[in-house]
């Protein structure tokens, strides 16, 4: 008998369990888009270069085009569809909308998911290549525009909405800090 | 339900910032792009491209692939339905690449040779990658250079303009600049790859696509498949960037062809790598600029020669030499555009075709002239401001370039600038500032629009406009609100459906102007139809307008947008790194409809200029004729960390002949931006960089030659 080329699995996406059978070649990105009708996660390059397919896996940023769906079982996956609280936009989404941190909108879900990751990573004290003082005792670096640009550089935007994306991430991070 | 027609008088929507009307859908992931609309029984097509740059296909070994799981068909030149590409469309004859699988010739690397269609995209991809294609290979020529013996002057209008005796004026000039500039092959690279789903629905070809003009693509598809124009419908609600690359391309034709053969819906999505061969690109250019001036900088002579390339199958011209025609006067004013045909894909329009590379050459040459004359670069340009079109002799509709210089210089702090190069250092960084001017033509095309007064007191606007990220949907909402004198919240704008009738494309910076004109006209018609206090029936009351006849009455004038670009850079001559520290662009570009989205669009254009100056360069392998590293890792576009705080703003400049005052802002932002950066790099280092992009290796290389004062 020929070896099986597909498997049944359960994916935990935005707090919901989805059981499906996938071709082993199926990426997490294609499983989301083609099988689960979660098309908010975008395919810009399909080879991990543009960041449009960024999702959060167990709270950390991941490019879903470089993840096989079969390897995502058991992970907590958050896509753009799971970011808002019902009809209430997440502060990051609201800031993107208000400050026009988008043009065509195709990179936007990836930028927003990435921004969520950036804000968490920064709050947890992770340094970046733009961090001037990386000593543990230096504490959490200030989330400057330089820091945001460095940390968001995995997400390309060909329309060139970078200036307002950086402002949106800064504003959302500030709002989150104040409400914390 | 009925309601009365008395509108609430609210005006002033135009000119006030408004977030994108579809913005919420875009930040929540609800906005669906072309490849994301579900269809029952959908099949997936995957393209196979030629691996040779010239020759013919001798055989396609389809049999083994047809036996693979899920494979439904393999289309190639031996079995594909006939299509017609010998027609004239809105913008002329099509690039023959859209006539897929009609013969065995291969004119460039990456030419479509087969489409594999399967039940799933995984199956289609594996089968396509397994397909063996045999070729009879011939020697190819892809070497582009100014010295290529095959270059010629195209027969198209405006390829050559000559005013005055150039050689005599050059000879009589006190200061002369004679320099060659080059720009590389550049790719649009919109974030959303080209995608189309086609199906037959009740005798009509129904296509969901990503394009810059749904009625345009529908018309082209009807011609390709010899169908009645009314029997093709194209929709393109959300478009993930376009920049000139999203017209009729192979994906729509392939999807329609496969849907016809299989009688079921077929989706074809180009891969990122395939886009580098199949959706057009900006031709590389070599340009020679000769300027001759009086001691005070007044131009006696301006000569701009530009060479671009095209494929062997279609002539596309990148008219870089035309940039100076409406810009600067000179006693002798010559421009000349030439093209050479090579075994490469056909280039196409890419954001500011002609003006983007042309402004790099001429605006850098003017900076060199300013240095020679010892005149401030802004003063030099003001000294050569024309009264009328330097070549055409026509009056300007409006020209507020000097206003851009004045406001830009004030905000950038230009007056404090020490003109001497290489005299500012901060640690390892040499600091410099530069400027350049910008212009782009103001164009308009015909459009039809319908406006319906609904029974619930709202209004629906229908127009086959395309919102490719420009904010057109929002701009048209504001324009309709003012024209109807109601709040924008009562307007619903539906775009990108060819069933709404013909509308000009989103291109040439003329989308919003063309559509705004039609929407304004239709709104006026509707107001004439509405009886104050009268009832509105359930189906609403609709008025339509077609601006086709109106536009013919526009007087012949030099109609342009203008801009002043400023940049500050830091250059590390040890590592070769160039960092842009800040940019400012001030534009005179007509009435600004929505300051929020307009600023984004202008800033986005300036970032394209930054990317053009420092990053973008597609390289072809001379041995294979194929692109090297054709993806977003090999082809660098500016990323977050490359882009500093950039400001764009404008001076008041409504177009007197447009009902809304619009000129168009889609392209002016990129024009001159790369020149401003290159001029700033000279100011920082004392070295002229005349070849884009200004890569670290070029900066390092030129450090060795800087005693000579000239870049490689």
Image (cartoon, rainbow, N blue to C red):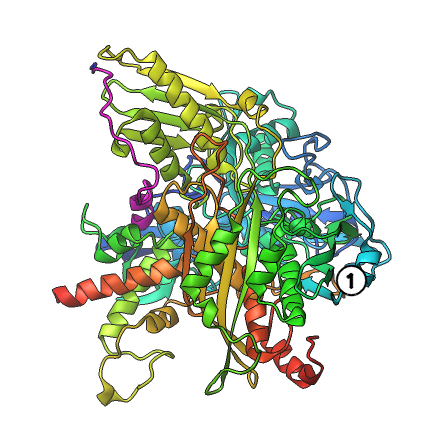
Task: Examine the rendering and report whether any part of residue A44 can be seen.
Answer: no
Q: Position of residue B492 (x, y in %)?
A: 32, 30
Q: Is residue B370 magenta?
A: no
Q: Provide the residue designation for mark 1.
A: B145
Image quarter of the N terminus of chain B = top left
Q: Nearer the viewer, residue B634 or B460?
A: B460
* B681 shown above or below B167: below
Q: Is residue B25 magenta?
A: yes
* Circle 1: element type: loop
Chain ID of residue with mark 1 = B
Specify whether B195 is left or right of B90: left
Q: Can you name the residue that lies furthest to the right here?
A: B149
Image position of B584 with respect to B58: above or below: below
Relative to the observer, which residue lies in front, B359 or B148? B359
Q: Position of residue B103 (x, y in %)?
A: 76, 40
Q: Quadrant of the C terminus of chain B?
A: bottom right
The residue shown at (77%, 59%) is B142
From the viewer's perspective, tell me whether residue B306 is left or right of residue A22. right
Q: Residue at x 54, y 67 (%)?
A: B677
Residue furthest to the left in view is A180
Q: Residue at x 73, y 37 (%)?
A: B102
Write down the region rendered in magenta. Answer: B4-28
Residue B88 lies left or right of residue A128; in this view the side is right
Above or below: residue B243 compared with residue A132: above
């Amino acid at each position: 008998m020929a070896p099986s080329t597909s498997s049944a699995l359960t994916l935990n996406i935005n707090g919901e369990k989805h059981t499906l059978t996938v071709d082993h070649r199926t990426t997490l990105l294609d499983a989301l888009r083609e099988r689960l009708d979660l098309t908010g996660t975008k395919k810009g390059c399909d080879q991990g270069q543009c960041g449009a397919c960024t999702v959060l896996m167990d709270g950390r940023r991941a490019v879903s085009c470089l993840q096989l769906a079969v390897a995502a079982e058991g992970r907590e996956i958050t896509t753009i569809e799971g970011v808002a609280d019902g009809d209430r936009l997440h502060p990051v989404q609201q800031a993107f909308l208000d400050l026009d941190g988008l043009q065509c909108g195709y990179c936007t879900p990836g930028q927003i998911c990435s921004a969520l990751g950036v804000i968490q990573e920064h709050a947890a004290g992770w340094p970046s290549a733009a961090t001037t003082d990386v000593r543990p005792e230096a504490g959490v670096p200030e989330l400057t525009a330089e820091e945001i640009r460095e940390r968001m550089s995995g997400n390309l935007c060909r329309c060139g909405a970078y200036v307002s994306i950086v402002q949106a991430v800064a504003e959302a991070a500030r709002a989150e800090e104040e409400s914390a | 339900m009925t309601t009365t027609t008395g509108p609430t008088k609210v005006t002033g929507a135009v000119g006030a910032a408004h977030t994108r009307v579809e913005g919420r859908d875009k930040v929540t992931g609800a906005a669906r792009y072309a490849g994301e609309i579900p269809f029952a029984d959908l099949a997936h097509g995957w393209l196979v491209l030629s691996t040779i740059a010239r020759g013919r296909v001798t055989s396609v070994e389809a049999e083994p692939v047809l036996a693979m799981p899920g494979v439904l068909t393999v289309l190639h030149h031996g079995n594909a339905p006939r299509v017609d590409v010998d027609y004239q469309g809105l913008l002329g004859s099509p690039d023959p690449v859209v006539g897929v699988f009609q013969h065995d010739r291969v004119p460039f690397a990456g030419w479509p040779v087969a489409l594999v269609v399967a039940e799933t995209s995984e199956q289609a991809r594996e089968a396509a990658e397994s397909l063996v294609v045999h070729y009879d290979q011939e020697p190819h020529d892809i070497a582009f250079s100014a010295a290529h013996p095959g270059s010629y002057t195209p027969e198209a209008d405006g390829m050559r303009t000559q005013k005055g005796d150039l050689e005599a004026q050059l000879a009589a000039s006190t200061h002369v600049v004679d320099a060659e500039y080059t720009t590389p092959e550049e790719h649009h690279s919109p974030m959303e790859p080209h995608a189309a789903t086609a199906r037959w629905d009740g005798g009509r070809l129904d296509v969901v696509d990503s394009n810059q003009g749904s009625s345009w693509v529908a018309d082209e598809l009807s011609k390709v498949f010899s169908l009645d124009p009314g029997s093709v419908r194209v929709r393109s609600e959300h478009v993930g960037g376009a920049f000139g690359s999203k017209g009729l391309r192979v994906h729509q034709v392939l999807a329609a062809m496969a849907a016809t053969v299989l009688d079921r819906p077929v989706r074809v999505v180009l891969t990122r790598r395939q886009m580098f061969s199949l959706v057009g690109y900006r031709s590389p250019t070599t340009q020679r600029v000769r300027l001759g001036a009086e001691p005070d900088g007044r131009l006696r002579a301006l000569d701009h020669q530009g060479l671009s390339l095209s494929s062997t199958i279609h002539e596309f011209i990148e008219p870089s030499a035309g940039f100076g025609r409406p810009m600067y006067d000179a006693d002798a004013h010559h421009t000349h555009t030439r093209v050479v045909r090579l075994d490469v894909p056909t280039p196409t329009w890419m954001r500011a075709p002609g003006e983007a590379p042309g402004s790099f050459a001429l605006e850098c040459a003017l900076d060199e002239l300013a240095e020679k004359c010892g005149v401030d670069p802004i003063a030099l340009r003001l000294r050569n401001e024309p009264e009328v079109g330097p070549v055409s002799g026509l009056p300007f509709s409006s020209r507020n370039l000097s206003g851009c210089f004045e406001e830009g210089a004030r905000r950038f702090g230009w007056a404090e600038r020490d003109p001497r190069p290489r005299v500012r250092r901060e640690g390892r960084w040499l600091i410099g500032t530069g400027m350049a001017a910008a212009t782009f033509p103001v164009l308009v095309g015909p459009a039809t629009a319908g406006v319906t007064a609904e029974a619930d007191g709202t209004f629906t606007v229908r127009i086959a406009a395309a919102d490719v990220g420009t904010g057109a949907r929002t701009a048209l909402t504001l324009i309709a609100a003012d024209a109807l004198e109601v709040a924008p919240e009562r307007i619903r704008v539906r775009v990108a459906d060819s069933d709404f009738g013909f509308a000009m494309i989103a291109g040439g910076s003329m989308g919003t102007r063309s559509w705004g004109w039609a929407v304004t006209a239709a709104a006026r018609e509707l107001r004439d139809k509405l009886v104050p206090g009268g009832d509105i029936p359930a189906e609403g009351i609709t008025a339509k307008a077609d601006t086709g006849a109106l536009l013919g009455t526009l007087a012949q004038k030099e109609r342009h947008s203008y801009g002043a670009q400023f940049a500050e850079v830091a250059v590390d001559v040890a590592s070769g790194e160039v960092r842009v520290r800040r940019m400012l662009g001030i534009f005179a570009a007509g009435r600004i409809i929505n300051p929020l989205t307009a600023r984004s669009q202008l800033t986005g254009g300036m970032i394209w200029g930054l990317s053009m100056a420092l990053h973008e360069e597609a390289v072809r392998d001379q041995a294979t004729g194929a692109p090297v590293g054709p993806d977003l890792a090999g082809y660098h576009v500016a990323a977050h960390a490359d882009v500093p705080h950039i400001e764009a703003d404008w001076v008041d400049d409504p177009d007197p002949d447009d009902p809304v005052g619009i000129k168009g802002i889609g392209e002016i932002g990129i024009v001159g931006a790369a020149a401003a950066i290159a001029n700033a790099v000279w100011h920082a280092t004392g070295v002229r960089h005349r070849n884009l992009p200004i890569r670290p290796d070029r900066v390092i290389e030129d450090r060795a030659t800087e005693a000579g004062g000239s870049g490689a």
